[in-house]
Amino acid sequence: FDGHFGTWYLVKFEDTDGNQFVYRGSQYFERGEDFVASFTIKEHNEYRGEKQTIVSRIHQHECEV
């Protein structure tokens, strides 16, 4: 999305246990890319019956898959 402060993205992630994480910010992520990350949890939410964790400040780390 384009806004007053530039482009921002809405990204939905899923971990290996099926937990869902939602990120809204300026960092772009490739679709289908596996990675290890640390982040700040902003809130826990439910959207259309699915429990989600809203996150920010994602930092990607080297991933050995």
Image (cartoon, rainbow, N blue to C red):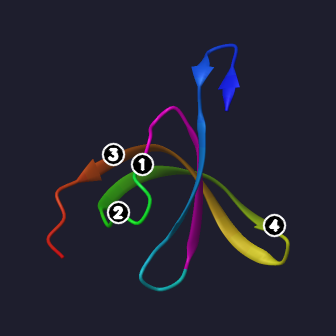
Q: Residue at x 29, y 50 (%)?
A: 60
Question: In the figure, 64 relative to 16: above or below?
Answer: above
Q: Earlier in the sequence, mark 3 or mark 2?
A: 2
Q: Position of residue 17 (x, y in %)?
A: 47, 86
Residue placed under numbered mark 1 in the picture: 29
Q: Earlier in the sequence, mark 1 or mark 4?
A: 1
Residue 12: where, in percent of width, then height? 58, 60
Q: Identify the residue at the far front of this view.
A: 31
- Element marked by disc 4: strand
Q: Which numbered disc flags the more N-terminal residue, 3 or 4?
A: 4
Seen in the picture, residue 59 relative to 27 is either above or below; the reply is: below
Quarter of the figure that contains the N terminus? top right
Are dots 1 and 2 in contact, CB under 8 Å? Answer: yes
Q: Are marks 3 and 1 in contact (CB under 8 Å)?
A: no
Residue 5 in percent (x, y) is at 62, 15
Tag 1 or tag 3, which sits nearer the N-term? 1
What distance separates the C-alpha of mark 3 from that of mark 2? 14 Å
The numbered dot on residue 33 is 2
Amino acid at circle 1: Phe
Which residue position is annotated with label 4?
47
Residue range of the region highlighted in magenta in the rendering: 19-28
Q: CA distance from mark 2 to mark 4?
A: 24 Å
Identify the amino acid type marked 2: Glu
Q: On the image, numbered disc 3 is attached to which residue?
A: 59
| Quadrant of image for the C terminus | bottom left
Nearest to the eye among marks 3 and 2: give it: 2
Report the residue at 43% width, 51% height from top: 39
Figure quadrant of residue 25: top right
Q: Relative to 46, does residue 37 appear above or below in the rendering?
A: above
